[in-house]
Amino acid sequence: MDIQEIAVYVIVAAVVVYFLFKIFGKKKPKDGCGPNCGCS
Amino acid sequence: MKHTINIALIGNPNVGKTSVFNMLTGLKQKVGNYPGITVEKKVGVFKVNNQLKANILDLPGSYSINATSKDEQVVLDLLFDQNNEHYPDVVLVVADVENIKRNLLLFTQIKDLGLPTILAVNMADRMGPKGISLDIQSLEAALDTKVVLLSVRENKGFEELKGAIASYKELSKEKIIDIKSIDTAHFEQFAAANPNKDVYQHWLVQDGSSSSEIKKIQHKETVKRYQIINEALNKSYAVNALEASDIRSKMDRVLTHWFFGYAIFFGIMLLIFQSVFDWSSIPMDFIDGLFASLIESLKETLPAGKLTDLITDGVIAGINGVVIFIPQIAILFLFISLLEESGYMSRVVFLMDRIMRPFGLNGKSIVPLISGTACAIPAIMSARNIENWKERLITILITPFTTCSARIPVYVIIISLVVPDKKVFGFIGLQGLTMTGLYILGFFMAIISAWILNKIIKSKQKSYFVVEMPTYRLPLLKNVFYTVVEKTKSFVFGAGKIILPLSVLLWFLGTHGPGDNFTNAEEIITSTYVDQQLSEEDLQDKVASFKLESSYMGLIGKSIEPVVRPLGYDWKIGIAVIASFSAREVFVGTLATIYSVGSHADEEDISLIKDRMMRETFPDGTKVFTLATGVSILLFYAFAMQCISTVAITRKETNSLKWTVIQAVGMTLFAYIVSFVAYQLLK
């Protein structure tokens, strides 16, 4: 496995982690949503 | 050290509040000319003077603080929450000089909360043409407040406004009316029940009376306030009708006419979509060529290897799939923004109320439906200003049917593939006409769904429609520019955040695979075709194609092919459809990645994604992208809920998992059935 191939695996692993984080990561509540505005 | 204060910017819809915000802060923000466009609070910072800095909060447009809509609730929440980080040190109420009487109702309510308040009378440049005269001193005395005359168009009054803000501690906190004078018995009793509390503030949020009783008192409050406003304006405000020109009513008669109104509206829409196609072809070709040369030069410069392939075929090919649509999106928003800025969009709202009513919608539903041509997310949020819950829910559920900008890349590529570039009647392009047809189809589908939902959802709440008719004005080019830049940027970066990593992942799945078939593709193909006299190029094509089929991506695509084949799709389109469940625009980027992976032809030949797609065939040699497949894809993307962000915003705005699931599953299922029928009929 050459250096380019290792770099590719590292990048792809990072991308998978990024997607997992996007899907399962906790989302910060958006500013501006009070208790009465229908979004909480 | 600089001291920082908080300013709340409040006003009725269409008073130019957001333009004032832009002038003060220089921040880029969506500026519209029809009600409900400002749905989220926006904060900006500006220097008042050398000692003072201000955080300014642009609140949604409200008619009063007797909250009847979500927008008004946002205003109320801030003004009553002293612990809120944006709780204002000073409130800047913006009024339109032409509609000052109505605008002052909100002002008097804010003033009666006991907050230091400045009244900014905006659009002063309209005073001359409308024959309006305003005695500032007299108005200040009558309302016991600081009044500043502003003109965003002529950049006038802002230094005086900053001066008034700097002296915010000297502003009067005196109330305009004694709340008890509205209904003595009711408020005496209310005050006795709530000792040591500000009666007006407390009454606005805590009155436990029946809703009909509250409405009665609110009505009395409005009458009382208008008495005071009339007295104040009688002394300070005059309109000389002889000086005023009446172009507005003449234009209104035509633009809101029962026949010409609609004819003009659809004519304008057709013109817009025609321009989106015609004007964007040159910059699009330029961008495409630029990316093709970039890929070529990188392949020559960088050392050969998998990382270089990832950069060129994965990352850059994917980015190209997004960037190439910048010209079209910018042109579309240029037109939409011009319509908003000119005041025409509000006429469309009025015009559409007649159509909307029978379908359980409100005239205001047109705001989300038209905003939905940009993006369903802000559009769904803009439904907050629809007071009636049922109408709001229906609007939220149907808005994703309108053709959002993310669909444009899919439509453009498919239309240019399967619809001939011909003219109808010698001047209307068939491709532009198809695009217009898809926009109308989206709108039509939204209306039909609304009608069905109106029959299903039951509600006893009464509905009413109030819309602001702003004067016609020449669009402020700065605001148009901000909108175009902001919307294009949000499309590119919003889509890019998904497309870039997805392109990397897709490239990996397409260039790696399990088992011997993938690893030994070259030997297998060479031995298979050993008897045939294939050229080196043809042989390499066969190898590339076999490798793609044996890759992870090929295996995934083939496993879902039975599901998508009845719609006319091959496994490659199937992958693009699955990938674009996250966002529609991913479809084109994904296909670009898939096809560049599978081809080894010269870069010049494959520079256009379109060309790559045009060459695609099924194993039996028939073309993949025929009219039947094209129509099937167009219909699928017109109706399917392929946007995770829209699902999230529906969940947030409806606060209901049930309606979110109904919307997502219902739309996608419907899209599948329609595409299936269309393909089977046309093939």
Image (cartoon, rainbow, N blue to C red):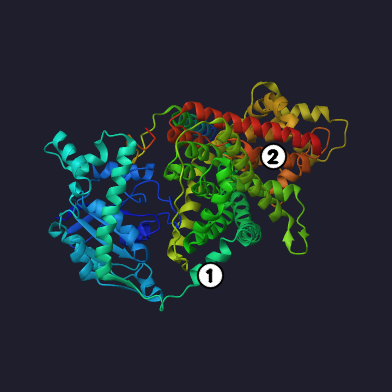
Residue named by callout 2: B633
Which label belongs to residue B250?
Answer: 1
Instruction: Name the one closer to the observer, B275 or B532.
Output: B275
Which label belongs to residue B346?
Answer: none
Question: How packed is label 1: few (under 14 Cα within 10 Å), some, or many (20 or more)?
Answer: few
Q: Residue furthest front?
A: B185
Tell me the kind of residue under disc 2. Ile
Residue at 43%, 50% in the rendered image: B36
Tell me the kind of residue under disc 1. Lys
Q: Earlier in the sequence, mark 1 or mark 2?
A: 1
Looking at the rendered structure, the secondary structure element under dot 1 is helix
Is residue B309 shown above or below B328? above
Looking at the rendered structure, the secondary structure element under dot 2 is helix
Q: Is residue B175 visible?
A: yes
Q: Is residue B368 left or right of residue B55?
A: right
The chain carrying label 2 is B
Q: Nearer the viewer, mark 1 or mark 2?
A: 1
Q: Position of residue B223 (x, y in %)?
A: 29, 53
Residue at 61%, 36% in the rendered image: B640
Residue at 51%, 45% in the rendered image: B362
Q: In which quadrant of the rendered view does residue B528 lie?
A: top right
Q: Position of residue B46 (x, y in %)?
A: 27, 58
Residue at 75%, 56% in the rendered image: B421
Q: CA distance from mark 1 to mark 2?
A: 45 Å
Q: Position of residue B357 (x, y in %)?
A: 55, 45
Q: In which quadrant of the rendered view does residue B582 lie?
A: top right
Question: How packed is label 2: few (under 14 Cα within 10 Å), some, or many (20 or more)?
Answer: many
Q: Position of residue B603 (x, y in %)?
A: 68, 49
